[in-house]
Amino acid sequence: MAAQRNLLLFAGVALLFILTGVFQSWNLSLNILNLALLSAIMAIGVNIQWGYAGLFSTGIVGSVALGGLAVVLVSARPVPEGWAAGGPRILGALVFAAIAIGFAVWLYRRLKPGASRTLALALYLIVAFFIYRAVLDPAVVAVEANNPAQAGNIGGLGLNSLVAWPVGALMAAAAAWVIGKIALGLREDYLAIATLGIAEIIVTVMRNEDWLARGVKNLIDLPRPWPVPKEVDLQSNPAFLEPVASLGLDPVTASTIFVKLLYATMFGLVLVLLVWGCERALNSPWGRMVRAIRDNEISSAAMGKDVKFRHLQIFIIGSAVVGLAGAMMTSMEGQLTPPSYLPLRFTFLIWVMVIVGGSGNNWGSILGGLLIGWLYLAVEFLGPQLMSAITAGLPAGGLRDHLQDTAAHMRLLTLGVVLLLVLRFAPKGLIPEK
């Protein structure tokens, strides 16, 4: 019965995408599907952290942003002038900062606790900071002065965007290791606050450091991942135009649908591989150990399990999955827009997906990602249509205009209602953990 119910739930979600294609457009339906697939991958990453190990992290947006940054550093066109102006010096400053932090950690462990250690570390860090800024600042000014209207950054390696996907996962994993070392020893509510703050620091750095990825100026025209072509290239390719013409289709519409189908295939393949690996891990001795730690840390520690190490391990794996999805999203959009990395979209919405789908269950996370992903984007065009139908009988004037203006808020209202209904009637999610 449970398997049949789960199939019906997925069939119902698939029907939503089909109806969107039939009554709106297949371009819109596929666009929502691609974003929903990416959201489902992010939901799996959050489910690994929360559903497997009970780690309540609100820093998801930071991992998504780092994944997007990886696409810029790996795939963006090189800017030789910008790199020559100050790239090596910036790299040297970052290396110096890493060595200085490592030496500070070594000092902290070597010196005896007390006021003398605190004073020595404070003096050392102040001096190191001023040296770091003295090396970094002139280089940053030189890079950002190089053609600021079109560049002003160090550029990327110019590699295929597909290479940036695992790099995005690695960058998010490296940041998670640092965050985990700092925050995983905190209590659950403090962990949530710390991860949210650190994620905001990551996004703020990306917004303000123009030399890195042009900051709020945004970086556009990023190359697409192999083998996805550009629509304009398809529209001039006889091998594509001939079968399209024989079917009587519009070349412009057909090319956009073809490209989105390619993305959907690639994202779907990544999602399938992730689910296969997660299911094997969850049902292995490792998965049972992690869930035992989640349910009772004290008894697990008494059985000889390294709770702190396992928490760090899970935190890194979940963040890497989210970073992978962030790189895939930037690769598909072809641009990096740091102002778009908002906690509402890339933290709390992903949490809603996990809660609605069912934490601790990989299939529940996928269902929640697809359902809430569709709902979040579909309400954008369904809300105004619904409100227009509701207010059709009202006379023109203040009340009608006010109600139609509130349609812009239908998205948040709908998500809140769905979340309340699920928490009331299915508190463990639509597909709960076994």
Image (spheres, rainbow, N blue to C red):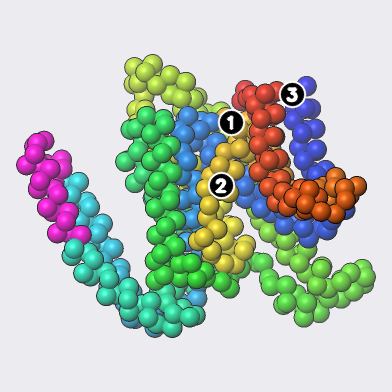
Q: Earlier in the sequence, mark 2 or mark 3?
A: 3
**Is any part of residue 286 visible from this angle?**
no
Q: Nearer the viewer, residue 216 or 231?
A: 216
Image point 78% across, 48% down: which residue? 399
Q: Earlier in the sequence, mark 2 or mark 1?
A: 2
Q: Amino acid at mark 3?
A: Ala
- Please tell me in which quadrant of the rendered image residue 186 appears: top left
Q: Is residue 55 left or right of residue 162?
A: left
Point out the residue furthest to the left here. Answer: 116
Relative to residue 217, is residue 299 depicted above or below?
above
Q: Amino acid at mark 1?
A: Ser
Secondary-structure class at tag 1: loop
Relative to residue 67, is residue 79 depicted above or below?
below
Give the residue pinned by disc 2.
Answer: 344
Circle number at residue 359: 1
* In front: label 2 or label 1: 2
Circle number at residue 191: none
Whether residue 163 is in magenta: the answer is no
